[in-house]
């Protein structure tokens, strides 16, 4: 029976620990520093998206050009 209560205690501790961590992270992300972090992350992700999009277009056009040359020959 002690194994069951020990197991239950661990589950409850993990559950409430998760809630506490979620509250702490939520509180921090709504602070001024957290907002700045979110804004910086959004800006960096947007820049990364633009670079990836440009690279994909470049590779696509290069592959298309090579495919056209193969078809032509």
Image (cartoon, helix red, strand yellow):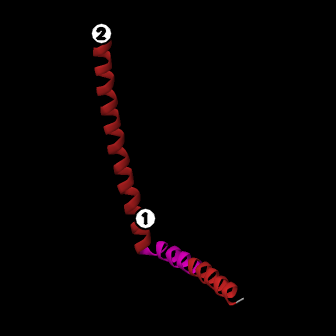
Label number found at residue 72: 2
Of 1 and 12, the residue lying toward us: 1
Farthest bottom residue in view = 2
Q: Which region shows up in magenta? A: 19-32
Which picture quadrant has residue 11? bottom right
Residue 13 vertical placement versus 26 (above, below): below
Calculate the distance from the C-alpha at mark 2 to the C-alpha at mark 1: 50 Å
Q: Is residue 26 magenta?
A: yes
In the picture, measured across the screen, residue 65 lies left or right of residue 18, that is: left
Residue 61 vertical placement versus 43 (above, below): above
In the picture, measured across the screen, residue 28 lies left or right of residue 6, that is: left
Q: In the image, which is nearer the foreground, mark 2 or mark 1? A: 2
Of 70 and 45, the residue lying toward us: 70
The picture places residue 72, in percent across and down from the top left corner, at 30, 9
Q: Quadrant of the C terminus?
A: top left
Label number found at residue 68: none
Q: Residue at x 35, y 44 (%)?
A: 50
Q: Which residue is mark 1?
A: 38
- Mark 2 Cα within 10 Å, few/some/many (few <14, many 20+)? few
């Amino acid at each position: 029976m002690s194994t069951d209560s020990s197991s239950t205690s661990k589950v409850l501790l993990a559950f409430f620990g998760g809630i506490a961590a979620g509250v702490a992270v939520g509180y921090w992300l709504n602070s001024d520093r957290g907002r700045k972090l979110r804004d910086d992350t959004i800006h960096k992700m947007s820049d990364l998206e633009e670079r990836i999009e440009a690279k994909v277009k470049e590779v696509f056009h290069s592959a298309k050009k090579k495919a056209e040359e193969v078809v032509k020959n």
